[in-house]
Amino acid sequence: MLRHVLKQVVAGVVLVLATTAITFALLYSGGTSIARNVLGLDASESQVAAKAQELGLDQPLLVQYGAWLSDLFHGSLGQSFVTGEPITHMLSSRIPVTLSLVVISMILMAILSVLIGVAAATKGGWIDRVLQVVAISGSSVPHFLIAIGLVLAFALAIPLLPATGYVPFEKDPGAWAASLTLPVLAILISGVAAAAQQFRGEMIDILQQGYIRTLRARGISERNVIFRHALRNASGPGLTILSLQAIGLFGGVIVIERVFALPGLGTLVATAARQSDIPAVMGCVLITVVVVVIVNSIADITNVLINPKSRAT
């Protein structure tokens, strides 16, 4: 097991380095044009050249990336091209917002997708039919339409929850939960059904296998057959889908945070990209990649713990 964890760590580090290197090359390839975007179109050529030299944009890309990595290993991500604020400070106030949204959504998505998927596979009937309809609808309707619909229904028509804004947990836990309820619901509506569909399909296949009939013939209770044996073997593909949902969730978070005016990473990366604040964009990319690597590693290790046979695959 330790060897498997070490392999995950090494693969994660390689992925982070490769992704940041490619992203850095794409973002910083503009050179002096980045300095012009920062200064504005009215800046003279001499001002642009001076700004490019000040920001280190006149150096070769490999040198710039080496300097960025050196700063990273020393706990710094540089400074904003626009405000001069340290990137770590900009991220520190926004990471809790996005992580709260993502972590809560993923936990609820995992629980609900397992319960709904197992119920659809074992009970069938209206549960299965509703799941099919919701799965198709949730995957075809854009995030922002679901979010707007929730705002119209539960913030304007029936004023139960705030339409926009974010309250830190340490300031008011109740208001914090209220501010995240609609965004989390918007994510769950579009994400739970797809994951539940995966669990449903795997459970149906496994429940038809011979060893399940043998377990039932031996008098083992249906609850134990489903949750201790069938679900364990169905967990691998389900966890894979959930990890992919987590990756896709960061794309949806940008839209969700904009709709609900949440001051998270999604809002920051959209603003930074518009202002050519490249260090801020790099900081957001780094955090996103690290979180994705951690989520995939947790899913893989959890799958090995639940079903040790998957270690060989």
Image (cartoon, rainbow, N blue to C red):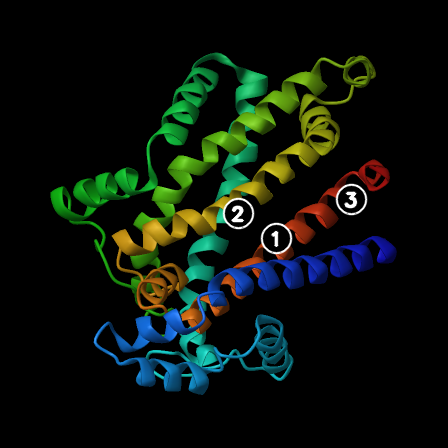
Task: Report x, y in % for residue 21.
Answer: 61, 63
> Where on the picture, by quarter, is residue 216?
top right
Q: Earlier in the sequence, mark 2 or mark 3?
A: 2
> Where on the picture, by quarter, is residue 212?
top right
**Label 3: how many Cα within 10 Å (few below 14, some 14–19, many 20+):** some
Give the vertical position of 36 relative to 240 (above or below): below
Q: Nearer the viewer, residue 299 or 180?
A: 299
Give the vertical position of 68 relative to 141 (above or below): below
Q: Nearer the viewer, mark 3 or mark 1?
A: 1
Q: Is residue 87 left or right of residue 203?
A: left
Q: Which mark is residue 246?
A: 2
* Residue assigned mark 3: 304
Q: Which mark is residue 295?
A: 1
Residues at marks 2 and 1, CA–CA distance in whole angstroms: 7 Å
Q: Earlier in the sequence, mark 2 or mark 1?
A: 2
Type of the residue with mark 2 = Ala
